[in-house]
Image (cartoon, grey):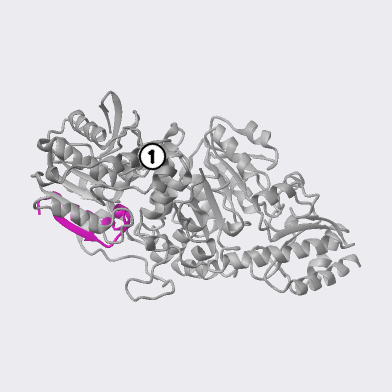
């Protein structure tokens, strides 16, 4: 028998309202910026209770802040998670997730199609702290399985790789994670909850660079780590940060303290407290202004992207377009299944004529801005091999789906006719 | 902390302090398909303010294994066996929702073991809708959606959370989702079937507190008030919250419990 329960509000409604009540002090309808480092204790008993986690509330804005909490709770609602922690950047969110789960001796299996900054962290920086990563081709499920070791504590990939535009088969990876009882962390920066929700696909943790589509305006740096509350940390002894007493907080056993939010508790009570990569309240305010229109914007982003993918695919100056909407893309069917509303406003393409043609193309563009970002209201262009991914050798570049001639576009909210006109002019320049 | 109750391990969270049987014990009992962690913001405070706290996981819930109990009477019998196992002669019992019926039944059956009784989000009887029962019987996710949405104030779905960064409904839904298959159906059926007489309620002699939520969609506040009116001398408190008062109004509920448990 089919049962129908009450449903939560639609994502469009959550994006505007979730996590916020009119300000209890003033009745302000907009989210106020609580620009304060600290919060007055009403009495000594409450002060002690707040410090000892006997009562919830705000103490110091490194740990939590009312403006930042609205953003966190709105993201938790949009992703259908149990809660979230906002961080100073997307990189800080990724670091916080990893540092909460493992220390020296830990091991990660990650997709080789990663944002360059994430690749730097995993390949070069974390090994210095005793955490190793094995990179595997995102589509080769047996490679994921084969890379898992007794020390492995996390599987990690991007919902849609940047800039490769590979689509991560989250349900298949979730099945592998389940076989080995490992958490799956997905960086969903490119897709956002407006196009797909990783927890519904089987992921356990999600990170975003909130700098990108969540904000949409390109005016702040921020990140967020969302806990799906779906992983059983107590099933074995591999996550002692969550299941053993923590000397740094009165011997608290986080998994006993909270059956669903142990990870978030540890990440906030240790990671935010000690590493300190918190989000500023004004940053949260700016992100929230963008987040309100996320579903509207993403629909326009992917619609315009489809148009541009079709345009580029037919152009004589273009060798190859890399986007899952191209029928020959290896993830074409997967993208349709996981992201029926569209999967990415990021695309890359190969220009005929290699590096020199790429230079002429980028310099001839007028509307597209040449910079190192994605997910802005403004359309963006970059040449990864000389910028975001310049530390990688050719083999690592190839593994990330990049060649010296790859150009990455992030399609903005301008009228698509104007974008096509701009691209058309620059492609003619590239051919000269 | 683990005990052995009716032959199986039984888990109770002690609020971050070692359990001290010499202090007055407060036993907190969760509702249908939940566990001890629903009392997160009350148990830890009480444990650090003079009480010996045992926030337990009923059998087949949370960290307590064992067979699913199908009646409130069986759960109450288990609760008394739990007191025996913990070496607690007399305890203050605090129960939420189904847990309020379990603690009520324990107080009716073994009044000498109960010093005080606090019933949070209660209704006697506690009718459960046919659609909810049917969905739970079929282990449909819709049953958890019903428990989650109806288990909070209507306004809570979009409101800011009293627990910074935590989605109350999201956390509640996932806690339900962790429950063992068949537990929600058994719990709801036990609530539906439990019908103590008004005469037995009138005979309760220990101090009783009933806490209701004025936005409660599951056990409306008037049902709680009616329970208080049928128990001589029972106190009644009504909070600005839905059914999940422990997280929706953590401090107002704590203060109501603290004052009651300290005899104030």
Tell me, yes or no, if residue B112 can be seen here. Answer: yes
Left or right of residue A193, residue A387 in this image = right
Left or right of residue A131, residue A42 in this image = left
Whether residue B247 is in magenta: the answer is yes
Nearer-the-camera pick, B10 or A350: B10
The residue that disc 1 covers is: B185
Mark 1 crowd level (few <14, some 14–19, many ≥20, 10 Å Cα): many
The image position of residue B6, as x and y in percent, is 26, 25
Residue located at (85% from left, 62% from top): A357
Which span is picked out in magenta? B235-264
Badge 1: chain ID: B
The image position of residue A366, as x and y in percent, is 76, 74
Left or right of residue B132, residue A365 in this image = right
Position of B130 relative to B11 (above/below): below
Extreme top residue here?
B7
The quadrant holding residue A65 is bottom left
The quadrant holding residue A432 is bottom right
Residue located at (26% from left, 37% from top): B72
């Amino acid at each position: 028998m089919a049962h129908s329960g009450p449903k939560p509000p639609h994502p469009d409604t959550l994006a505007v309202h979730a996590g916020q009540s009119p300000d209890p002090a003033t009745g302000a309808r907009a989210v106020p910026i609580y620009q304060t480092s600290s919060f007055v204790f009403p009495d000594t008993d409450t002060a002690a209770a707040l410090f000892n986690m006997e009562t919830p509330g705000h103490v110091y804005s490194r740990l939590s802040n009312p403006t930042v909490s609205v953003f966190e709770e709105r993201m938790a609602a949009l992703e259908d998670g149990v809660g979230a922690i906002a961080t100073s950047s997307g990189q800080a969110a990724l670091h916080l997730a990893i540092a909460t789960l493992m220390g020296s001796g830990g091991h990660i299996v990650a997709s080789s199609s990663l944002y360059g900054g994430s690749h730097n962290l995993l390949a070069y920086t974390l090994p210095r702290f005793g955490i190793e990563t094995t990179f595997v081709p995102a589509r080769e499920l047996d490679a994921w399985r084969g890379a898992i070791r007794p020390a492995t504590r996390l599987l990690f990939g991007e919902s849609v790789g940047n800039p490769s535009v590979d689509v991560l088969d989250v349900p298949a990876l979730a099945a592998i994670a389940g076989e080995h009882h490992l958490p799956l962390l997905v960086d969903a920066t490119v897709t956002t909850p407006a196009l797909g929700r990783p927890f519904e696909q089987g992921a356990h943790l999600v990170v975003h660079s909130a700098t990108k589509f969540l904000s949409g305006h390109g005016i702040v740096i921020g990140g967020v780590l969302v806990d799906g509350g779906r992983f059983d940390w107590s099933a074995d002894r591999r996550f002692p940060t969550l299941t053993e007493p923590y000397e740094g907080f009165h011997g608290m056993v986080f998994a006993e303290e909270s059956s669903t939010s142990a990870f978030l508790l540890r990440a906030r009570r240790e990671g935010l407290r000690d590493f300190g990569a918190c989000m500023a309240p004004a940053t949260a305010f700016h992100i929230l202004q963008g987040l309100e229109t996320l579903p509207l914007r993403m629909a326009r982003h992917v619609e315009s992207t489809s148009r541009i993918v079709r345009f580029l695919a037919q152009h004589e100056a273009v060798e190859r377009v890399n986007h899952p909407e191209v029928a020959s893309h290896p993830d074409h069917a997967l993208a349709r299944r996981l992201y029926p509303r569209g999967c990415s406003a990021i695309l890359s393409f190969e220009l005929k004529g290699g590096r020199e043609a790429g230079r002429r193309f980028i310099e001839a563009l007028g509307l597209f801005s040449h910079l190192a970002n994605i997910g802005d209201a403004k359309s963006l262009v970059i040449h990864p091999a000389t910028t975001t991914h310049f530390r990688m050798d050719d083999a690592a570049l190839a593994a990330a789906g990049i060649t010296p001639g790859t150009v990455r576009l992030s399609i903005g909210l301008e009228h698509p006719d104007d974008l096509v006109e701009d691209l058309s002019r620059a492609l003619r320049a590239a051919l000269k | 902390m683990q005990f052995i109750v009716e032959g199986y391990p039984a888990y109770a969270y002690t609020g971050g302090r070692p359990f001290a049987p010499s202090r007055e014990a407060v036993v907190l009992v969760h509702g249908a398909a939940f566990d001890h962690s629903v009392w997160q913001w009350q148990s830890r405070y009480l444990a650090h303010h003079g009480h010996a706290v045992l926030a337990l996981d009923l059998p087949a819930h949370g960290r307590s294994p064992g067979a699913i109990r199908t009646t409130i009477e069986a759960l109450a019998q288990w609760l008394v066996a739990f007191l025996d196992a913990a070496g607690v002669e007399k305890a203050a019992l605090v129960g939420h929702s189904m847990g309020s019926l379990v603690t009520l039944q324990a107080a009716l059956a073994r009044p000498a073991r109960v010093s005080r009784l606090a019933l949070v989000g209660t209704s006697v009887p506690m009718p459960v809708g046919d659609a909810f029962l049917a969905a739970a019987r079929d282990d449909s996710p819709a049953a958890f959606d019903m428990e989650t949405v109806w288990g909070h104030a209507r306004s809570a779905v979009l409101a800011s959370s009293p627990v910074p960064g935590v989605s109350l409904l999201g956390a509640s839904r996932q806690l339900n989702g962790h429950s063992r298959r068949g537990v929600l159906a058994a719990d709801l059926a036990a609530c539906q079937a439990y019908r103590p007489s008004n005469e037995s309620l009138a005979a309760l002699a220990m101090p009783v507190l009933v806490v209701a939520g004025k936005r409660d969609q599951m056990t409306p506040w008037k049902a709680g008030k009616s329970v208080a009116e049928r128990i001589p001398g029972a106190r009644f408190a009504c909070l600005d919250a839905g059914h999940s008062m422990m997280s929706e109004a953590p401090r107002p509920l704590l203060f109501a419990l603290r004052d009651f448990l300290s005899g104030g």
